[in-house]
């Protein structure tokens, strides 16, 4: 990433943060005019939300297809690919389960906000069996019209794998087309994200005015829960896999990874951290070819930190609206967040776009994102650290496996 681009991203993050602070100040100062804010300011926030909902479908569709296509190397790399994808899926599922469990334990510290500004009525109770059946679309257009994220994910998976099965010349054209479409919608997403400071201010100020200081303390609590879950996942899941499958002392692993982790924390970008992550892995003894395949794949499809963030935020937002998530809904979150990993680009802020999708998949209000968007960068720094550490663990484990089998030196 060029310095200019990086500083642009940083300035957006800074502007969003400024918007959050302004919303808090204005909201607190205008508590007596909550109705005015909700009538005249909130609609501008709604415009931002509409745009967010508009862009999430094509982003999910094309980036998941793109993610599947990028796995075409799996055929070349054979067993490494299969093992790695399964490892990525399982660890992401563990991550989201840890995130959901912790968030449920600490749920009582999340406030119920009594406001007409972000009101929402739960309409669809989802059972586990319904969830299962509803994953599969019965119509090509309906999932997109209804913004049914799970079905869109399944569509993308089917289309992605079908492209991989095309004959060579057609496949090359299809991949190029998907790449172009991906780029177009990524650009559109960038444009919409530029509006996020305005969106955050216009959505949040009315809520703060109606709720007062209680909402501010709750932001600290949800951040704390997310970081606790990040830490637990690293200490439990990665330590375990690195020790048992990677044949490496976990302390040595985390020590060796520290420079990549620090870089991920400050850049909030898995893609940006890729070169330094490769260097750390190779210094820890990972094979170069394995690393060169496993890490870019991970930066595209493996996002354990993002999955935790989505689980914690979903429970937080549900709690704010006074909604108790059912077991079926939790399961839906596990499935959607795990699959959303594929669609989350390894760049700052993309996990928040995917949060819109996770919320939609269980019928929670996308408006709730406004509650956490102002501090998204703080979530993002931690989740990116976890994202790249998970990728690195796969590089170490695969190298160890192949070495044991005598396939590499
Ligand atoms: N920033 C994260 C990454 O690059 C993705 C996200 O926003 O969750 O890994």
Image (cartoon, rainbow, N blue to C red):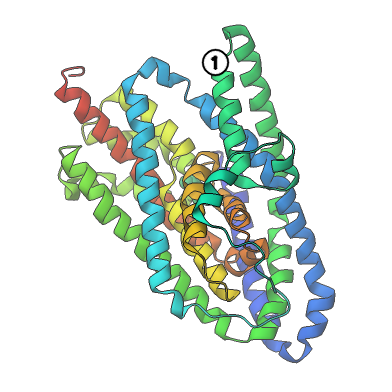
Q: Position of residue 266 (x, y in %)?
A: 45, 53
Q: Residue furthest front?
A: 129
The residue at label 1 has a CB less than 8 Å from ligand 1? no
Q: Quadrant of the C terminus?
A: top left
Q: Position of residue 294 (x, y in %)?
A: 37, 30
Mark 1 Cα within 10 Å, few/some/many (few <14, many 20+)?
few
The answer to whether 63 is drawn above or below residue 133 in the figure is above
Q: Is residue 179 left or right of residue 188?
A: left
On the question of residue 165 being in view, the answer is: yes
Q: Which residue is found at the position 58% from the left and 8% from the top?
A: 167
The answer to whether 134 is drawn above or below residue 156 in the figure is below
Q: Which residue is found at the position 30% from the left and 24% from the top?
A: 288
Q: Position of residue 252 (x, y in %)?
A: 18, 46
Foreground: 335 or 263? 335
Q: Is residue 103 left or right of residue 205?
A: left
Foreground: 310 or 187? 310
Q: Determine which residue is flagged by label 1.
A: 165
Q: Is residue 41 left or right of residue 309?
A: right
Q: Quadrant of the N terminus?
A: top right
- In terms of image quadrants, where is residue 188? top right
Q: Residue furthest bottom?
A: 32
Foreground: 160 or 228? 160
Q: Residue furthest right?
A: 40
- In terms of image quadrants, where is residue 69? top right
- In terms of image quadrants, where is residue 376? bottom right
SS for callout 1? helix
Q: Which residue is found at the position 42% from the left and 57% from the top?
A: 382
Q: Position of residue 60 (x, y in %)?
A: 62, 41
């Amino acid at each position: 990433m060029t310095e200019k681009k990086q500083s642009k991203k940083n300035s957006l993050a800074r502007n969003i943060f400024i918007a959050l602070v302004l919303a808090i100040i204005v909201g607190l100062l205008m508590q007596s005019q909550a109705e005015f804010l909700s009538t005249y300011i909130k609609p501008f926030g709604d415009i931002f939300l509409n745009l967010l909902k508009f862009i999430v479908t094509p982003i999910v569709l094309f980036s998941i297809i793109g993610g599947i296509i990028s796995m075409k190397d799996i055929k070349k790399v054979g067993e490494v690919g299969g093992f790695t994808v399964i490892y990525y899926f399982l660890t992401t599922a563990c991550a989201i389960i840890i995130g959901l469990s912790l968030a449920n334990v600490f749920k009582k510290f999340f406030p119920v906000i009594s406001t007409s500004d972000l009101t929402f009525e739960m309409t669809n109770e989802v059972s586990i069996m319904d969830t299962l059946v509803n994953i599969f679309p019965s119509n090509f257009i309906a999932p997109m019209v209804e913004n049914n994220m799970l079905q869109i994910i399944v569509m993308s998976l089917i289309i992605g794998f079908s492209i991989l099965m095309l004959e060579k010349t057609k496949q090359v054209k299809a991949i190029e087309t998907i790449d172009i479409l991906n780029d177009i919608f990524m650009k559109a997403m960038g444009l919409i994200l530029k509006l996020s400071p305005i969106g955050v201010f216009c959505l949040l100020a009315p809520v703060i005015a109606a709720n007062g200081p209680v909402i501010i303390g709750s932001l600290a609590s949800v951040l704390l829960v997310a970081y606790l879950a990040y830490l637990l996942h690293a200490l439990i899941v990665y330590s375990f896999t690195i020790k048992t499958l990677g044949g490496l002392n976990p302390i040595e692993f985390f020590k060796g990874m520290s420079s990549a982790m620090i870089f991920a924390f400050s850049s909030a970008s898995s893609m940006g951290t890729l070169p330094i992550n490769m260097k750390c892995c190779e210094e820890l003894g990972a094979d170069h070819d394995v690393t060169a395949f496993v890490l870019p794949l991970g930066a595209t499809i493996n996002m354990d930190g993002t999955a935790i963030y989505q689980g914690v935020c979903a429970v937080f937002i549900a709690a704010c609206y006074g909604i108790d998530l059912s077991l079926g809904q939790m399961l839906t979150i596990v499935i959607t967040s795990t699959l959303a990993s594929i669609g989350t680009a390894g760049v700052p802020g993309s996990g928040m776009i995917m949060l819109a999708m996770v919320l939609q998949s269980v019928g929670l209000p996308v408006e709730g994102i406004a509650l956490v968007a102002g501090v998204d960068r703080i979530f993002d720094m931690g989740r990116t650290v976890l994202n790249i550490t998970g990728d690195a663990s796969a590089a170490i484990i695969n190298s160890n496996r192949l070495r044991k089998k005598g396939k590499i030196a």
